[in-house]
Amino acid sequence: MTRRQSTAMKLLPDVIFLILVTAIGVYVVATSFSLQPETRAFAIATGAILVILAASVLGREVARGMARARSGIESPPAQAERRMATLLFALTWCVAFFVAVLLVGFIITIPFWVFALLLWNRASRVTTVVIPILLWALVKFVLEYGLDTILFRGILFGDRLPTFW
Amino acid sequence: MLFGPAEKFWLVAWAFVAIPFLSGKDWLKGLVSVALGLVLSFVGRSVVTGEFRYTFDTHYLGSGVGIIPFLAIGVFAVRVILELLSTPHQPISVGSVKVDMRQIWKGAIYVLKKPIALLRASFIGTIIGVIPGIGPITATFFAYMAARGCSKTPERFGKGEPEGVLAPEAANNSEQGGAAITTLLLGIPGNLDWAILLGIMIMYGITPGPDLIREHPNVVLGIIVGTVAGNVLGSTIGLFLGTQLARLTGLKPLYIIPFVFVSCMVGAYMINNVLWDCAIAIVGGLCGYFLEKLDYQLLPFTLGFVMGPPIEINFYQTLQIGLGSYSIFFNSVTSFILIFLCIASIALGPRLRVRISKDEG
């Protein structure tokens, strides 16, 4: 991997984040013009400040990255790459939980998700079985029976999803 | 009137520019963090006209980005879950934890034998805590230095001298009390914990600021009594169950993650019985993860997010009082002092940051 590629890889999370933040700022400024005049000024000013600040940090980070690459003190990109990979992996577990709850509800998702998580991470056999059952029992008996909480049962079991759009 | 809407606006604006300089290494990123938090707080109904804005025409975002699902559960809890999921087999404590019950009681009695050291460190912690954003690290550092300076045996510090532990810990705890002063008197959160509390107060329609004590004395008293009771309870649990609780640090995160994550998701759902709150908590976790890992600091972000609605209300109230003229923002001595503080913070902030970083080693 060339030094330029290495720098790009290390800068990537920061740059993506800053581009996203700048885009949010631009969106706020652009849409604020259609608001009522009474509420326009503060939103436009804040959005503009966000765009200026984010663009400044973006410029500075890119310049710093380039300087590091030129001076040859650039650290290997493997660490940044690994961090992104582990984050994506962790995020996948969280999103999988949400999607599973959406489809089949909390009561079914909780034991299966916990079981899969422990199994994937090679926990001992006893804990892989005991923790999901324990958590399921806690939610079922304490929340559903004890506190009369109605948890989401999943769209596959006829529960209706609250409107998002 | 010492504190009208214009003065309240400048007070919060001063907190917005000063805290990034005091709380983190990179002040520019801290300012980005404040502005981002502020912009996210705009989502939903306008606090002034009730008009919907930045909702992408969605029904869900019409009620705004919730403080509890997004900030309290997402940014603060799910963020940690994301970090722990990255290293599920690495125990929280590296060394083996063996705590003797007699040692705990000996330590507790030692504190009572050193009332002057305790009061001195607590006083330092409180004073440092009053300054928003500086945080407990500076408080513990100053308390340690003071204890060492006043000790007859300073050479024993760093070699197991109990007073070297007493002073930073006393300062660390009393810093919370100092932070409470700024939070309850000025409506500017002294640290992250108080920022969340402030957000919840706003959520329940309790406006933080100089009028809080006059308008809601029961809330302020409740917080003070709650803090005292919490400390007493925490100390009692620590004294009697310290040895057992210390073992928890040897647990692998893998066994903690299921309990915490499931609690977070069920908790997020139970706020409004809306499943999308779970999704917003996950988004908050991701946002918090990047803010933390990329050095954008969580305190400025929380401050911007929590103080967004109050600063906007004060801004438009000031404009209404001034019949649309912006000169009203510069009409009082208090406003001028606060504007001067804003400019001074921006001008001197970077130098102060370098100084604090050097002091903290």
Image (cartoon, coloured by chain):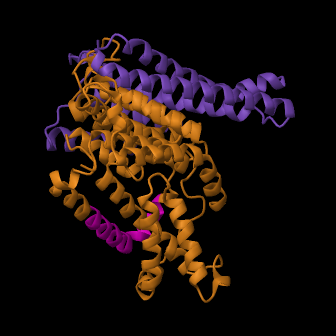
Chain colours: A purple, B orange
User: Looking at the rendering, which quadrant does residue B105 occupy?
Assistant: bottom left
Q: Position of residue B97 (x, y in %)?
A: 53, 66
Q: Position of residue B231 (x, y in %)?
A: 32, 67
The verdict on residue B247 being magenta is yes
Left-right relation of B230 to A149: right
Q: Is residue B134 above or below residue B235?
A: above
The residue drawn where x is 49% and y is 56% is B135
Residue stretch in magenta: B227-248
Q: Nearer the viewer, residue B230 or A112?
A: B230
Whether residue B259 appears in this view of the structure is no
Left-right relation of B36 to B182: right
The residue drawn where x is 58% and y is 37% is B28
Magenta stretch mostly in which secondary structure? helix
Q: Nearer the viewer, residue A22 or A128?
A: A22
Q: How many marks?
A: 0
The verdict on residue B243 being magenta is yes
Q: Quadrant of the C terminus of chain B?
A: bottom right
Q: Nearer the viewer, residue B163 or B278?
A: B163
Q: Is residue A99 above or below residue B2?
A: above
Q: Nearer the viewer, residue A49 or B290?
A: A49
Q: Is residue B208 above or below residue B223?
A: above
User: Looking at the rendering, which quadrant does residue A34 occupy?
Assistant: top left
Left-right relation of B96 to A64: left
Whether residue A88 appears in this view of the structure is yes
Q: Position of residue B284 (x, y in %)?
A: 42, 32
Q: Position of residue B248 (x, y in %)?
A: 45, 59
Q: Is residue B238 above or below residue B67?
A: below
The residue drawn where x is 44% and y is 34% is B285
The residue drawn where x is 33% and y is 39% is B331
